[in-house]
Amino acid sequence: MAWNIDQSHSDLGFAVKHMMISTVRGKFTRYSADVQLDPTNLAASKVTAEIETASVETGEEKRDGHLRSPDFFDVEKYPKMIFTSTKVTRSGDDLEVTGNLKIKEQEHSITLKGEVSGPSKDPWGNQRVGFSLSGELEREKWGLGWNQALEAGGVLVGKKVKITLEAQLIQS
């Protein structure tokens, strides 16, 4: 069965350490997905998601511009990141989604873990299902290696990026 992302009830976020002392959070505001799933057999699910790299937002325009530059996402040359699932495992409400994430020209496996809620019928008769997933990646593997050494030791931008996905899907 085909499902669509309900953009108004979904969020694709990330968090990374700044100067090794605080966490900067951001999100991507434009994304789409081709989702094929049967809520009673999630292991047979397939997901292909496209995230527009230019839609990155952290609340600081100068930082957002730097993230869009060739130092990071290089949005002119690589306008999209693509995630393609390879395996979905469910145990009760617990869920693991493994797939290949392509950023720039680098493609590596990543596993997101979390939970599934639903399906449930909304007041208008539509079937909905929710996913709350998170994972972590080492940004340098994907060609996002820009950094600056700090005088006191360490680096300006952390190497690990935490990914969070809150997705509400509506059956097509």
Image (cartoon, rainbow, N blue to C red):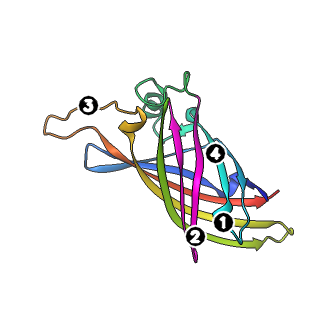
Residue neighbourhood size for the residue with mark 1, other residues' Cα within 10 Å, grouped as few (<14), some (14–19), many (≥20): some
Spatial separation of the CA atoms under disc 4 and disc 1: 17 Å
* Tag 3 residue: 148
* Tag 2 residue: 90
Percent of width and height locating residue 51: 60, 40
Badge 1 amino acid = Leu
Question: Which secondary structure lies at badge 1?
Answer: helix
| Residue drawn at x 58%, y 77% as measured from the top left | 92
Q: Tell me the tag on residue 49.
A: 4
Query: For the residues carrying marks 3 and 4, which lies nearer the camera in this image?
Result: 4
* Tag 1 residue: 42
Spatial separation of the CA atoms under disc 1 and disc 3: 43 Å
Badge 3 amino acid = Gln
Cβ atoms at labels 2 and 1 below 8 Å apart: yes
- First along the sequence among labels 2 and 1: 1
- First along the sequence among labels 2 and 4: 4
The answer to whether 33 is drawn above or below residue 142 in the figure is below
Q: Tell me the tag on residue 125.
A: none
